[in-house]
Image (cartoon, grey):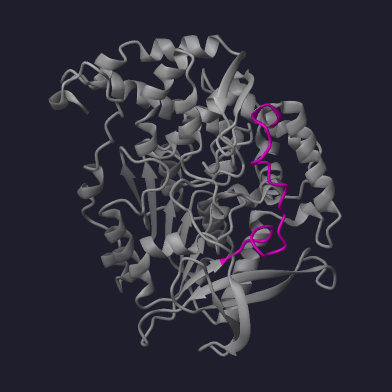
Amino acid sequence: MQGCNTSWVFGGVDGGGSVRRALACLTLIAVAAASPQIASAGGQVTRSCRVEGMPNELQCGLVQRPLDPANRAGVQIEVHYLVVPAMARNKQPDAVLVLAGGPGQSAVDIAPLVMSRLSRLNNRRDMVFIDQRGTGRSAPLQCEDESRLSVQESLDPEKQLARIRQCSETLGKLPYGDLRFFNTTLAVQDFDAVRAQLGVPQWNLVGASYGTRAALEYLRLFPDKVRRTIMDGVAPPDMVLPASFSVDGQAALEQIFSACAKDTQGNTACSRRYPKLRTQWTELLQSLPRAVSVDHPLTGVSERFTLSRGALLQAVRAPLYAPTLASGLPAAIHAAAQGRFEGLVGLSGALGNRKSMRLALGMHFSVVCAEDVPRMTSAAAVSGPDFGAEDAEKYASVCKFWPRGKVDDAFYTVPTASSPVLLLSGGADPVTPPRHGERVAKALGAKAQHIVVPEAGHGVSGIGCMRDVVARFVTESSDAQAMPHDVACATKIPRPGAFLPIQSGISAGDRP
């Protein structure tokens, strides 16, 4: 989840309490600034550029693409990309393409953090980050930043819907404002145009969250252009995002209650401190809506507003993305049950409100309204008891007026993999848990391997030994060597213990 806004729109695969909140494990930076043109080693024209957070001069480029592929003489858009050149002079030709999450995240914006985690892949391979159409500098579909709205105004469902409607009307007036032409299939075609321009024979795809959906579509459309694929937090095309979030978020929350109940060792055990945590949570939900007072997360000004059930659930959903933050939920829920909501507000915005954490709302709704909501026939039948169908219903209300592109039925199929695929899942992930990865791995067939890190949240490729597993998968020369044989290190990564505030009367030796 990104940002600290408590709006109901939760950012697709990567959101928590706002569409500006995204993949918990991808953060930081600003858009690259281009300078004079130079020719790349492959003979293509790129530009020397700098990216905040990265020390070396990089290469930036763009491809001209038709907004509507069926009308190549019509409106054109620029698809921008960033190349981080390989460190070694004798580099491998198969570059690494990083696919961003969201939907709506800028790949260029997340480059610094991704590079810090996947730097070994850059030793002998270029790393490429493409701003998907509708994001970053590629025909951006940005709505107004709402982070400075009052809490009451940001939570008002009618005003939220009115702002989104206004955004769709404003975006529709742009030169490239036909919102029907911003979907995963068209984006993947753009990605292959970049591959052709750079002269890359095959990509190594690395996708996280929604980026895994893009990876699956690339495998479907261009299987011979892919050498290896890594999918971290699998979001298949038939997932039906808004509906599945309820079930998966509920499961992750229940793990918090279960872990606390099982923690019985010592005087500071979670079960001792919060013996009625689940009951407190249920009673808290039943008490809503109610008037509460909290300090605005950005301005620090105390505000009084009506807290709804939906707003509370979104505030809780956000920290579930990262177990280190989720460890604070028992204390925060306990405090909220006593009328103190500062803990939940703090956790809901703990991942920050940096530029890279914001989603392009217009692109987000264009994708979800075209690919997911039309298949959302019975959200109530697949909802969790606490989270319910509220999110699904609110997405449906937006998609009633949002322009919707056409999606082929074949988009929802998962092809048999013709090259090795490594799927990664976190057992505590509230949005892309192992059940999705298991199903996709089975469809991909014998060349796919699914690794589950039981106590991890949303995104596991940067955790401990998983960095080595990912690096080896890409760098090994043969397919047989690439597939990991021993990943016991991942299964042993523990869940962070519950955060227990120090209380008076507890001796120093007993403090958590």
**Picture mark count:** 0
The region drawn magenta spans 130-153
The vertical placement of 409 against 192, above or below, is above
Residue at 72% of width from left, 27% of height from top?
157
The vertical placement of 357 against 139, above or below, is above
- Which residue occupies the foreground of this view, 385 or 29? 29
Would residue 139 be counted in the magenta stretch?
A: yes
Would residue 410 be counted in the magenta stretch?
A: no
Residue at 54% of width from left, 87% of height from top?
40
Q: Position of residue 289 (x, y in %)?
A: 62, 14
Classified by dominant secondary structure, the portion drawn in magenta counts as loop
Which residue is at the far left?
509
The image quarter containing residue 276 is top left
Q: Position of residue 479 (x, y in %)?
A: 32, 67
The vertical placement of 165 against 316, above or below, is below
Q: Could you tell me which quadrant the C terminus lies in?
A: top left
User: Left or right: 484 with respect to 324?
Assistant: left
Q: Position of residue 458 (x, y in %)?
A: 42, 43
- Which residue occupies the foreground of this view, 168 or 287? 287
